[in-house]
Amino acid sequence: MRSDTNRCWRLATRPVGLIKDSDFTFGEEPIPEPKDGEILVRTLYLSVDPTQRIWLDRDSYIPAVRIGDVMRAGGIGTVVRSNSPAFAPGDLVQGLLGWQDYAVLATGEDPLLPATKLPPGLAPELALSVFGVTGLTAYFGLLDIGRVKQGETVVVSGAAGATGMMVGQIARIKGCRAIGIAGGPEKCAWLTGELGFDAAIDYRSEDVEARLGELCPSGIDVYFDNVGGAILDAALAHLAMRGRVVLCGSIGDYNASEAPAGPRNYLSLLMKRGRMEGFIVTDYFGRLGEALSELGGWVSSGKLKNRVDIQEGLEKAPATLNRLFTSANVGKQLLKVADR
């Protein structure tokens, strides 16, 4: 990588299905100049998240990436130039860096992801996983939306992914049964082995609805949905009385060319007096201190384990995002762009 240019991926066309390199332009540009109150950051790691696929298609909780813009992504980098008294060269910072070697960040308030310093000693891999958006999503989704209580049965789909692996472990910490749904025997063995899930269902080789009936004879108290589709239907069919469904994502539909079908078993919510609620973790940024304190304690005590899947090279950005939709990753997906 040349140190005097900025490689970046810019959106060229709206993707159809899995993204392709040709949906973007990848080239070298002059390194941007920070203005007053801004900082220039050299990208080290990029967070790779399913929601980034949504950003390429349509407005959601934030506007879609515009044609011609650098692909949006959170990440961690090193300050190389600062026009803000709050930051100095060498500081490790987190913010919306995008798919590029260098990014200019404003240091004021940003409604999505403010530029913030990393606490001393915190590894970027932890900052972007347990203490990042995915860990916070698991924490607030399960505890605030799911309102989980000791002794309940919690089922989570996408259980071997960045958020799902945290949901199951937090459920266990809170005294619940944790059942994960994942693809493949290796992922399922990892869930029940290293992470301590009570059971795991391999959606590729097992009848999910039948297995839920076997494993949850009294019903599912909290279903944490990361995938939507047929697995959501299967969970609704086994909802416990006053069960809660936490809508976090629908990764199975993000690449679909047609609108997804609605759930078949939604009447279970009526019959079981259940509740299904969606949320976006940015709604909880005012309560970060609460979550980070508790998550940090669990990590320090060994109760909460982490796993990251790191791909290397900015040129691999599109392929790395696609790993999330082909079940290629285990744990939190990251892209390493440069060494410190």
Image (tube, rainbow, N blue to C red):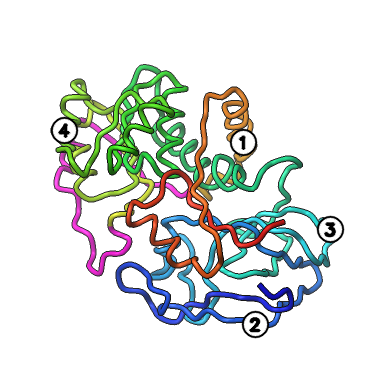
Q: Earlier in the sequence, mark 2 or mark 3?
A: 2
Residue carrying label 4: 271
- The reply to whether callout 4 and callout 3 are in contact (CB within 8 Å) is no
Disc 2 from disc 1: Cα separation: 37 Å
Left or right side of 12 for 208? left
Mark 2 is surrounded, within 10 Å at the Cα level, by few (under 14), some (14 to 19) or many (20 or more) other residues, namely few
Q: Earlier in the sequence, mark 1 or mark 3?
A: 3
Element marked by disc 2: strand
Q: Earlier in the sequence, mark 4 or mark 2?
A: 2
Residue 145 position (above or below residue 110): above
- Where residue 286 appears, as percent x and y from the top left, is 61, 44
Residue at figure coordinates x 33%, y 38% from the top left: 186
Residue carrying label 2: 29
Disc 4 from disc 1: Cα separation: 37 Å
Disc 2 from disc 3: Cα separation: 24 Å
Q: Which mark is residue 88?
A: 3
Magenta span: helix, strand or loop, mainly? Answer: loop
Q: Earlier in the sequence, mark 2 or mark 1?
A: 2
Element marked by disc 1: helix
User: Which segment did they paint magenta?
Assistant: 253-280
Left or right side of 6 for 130? left
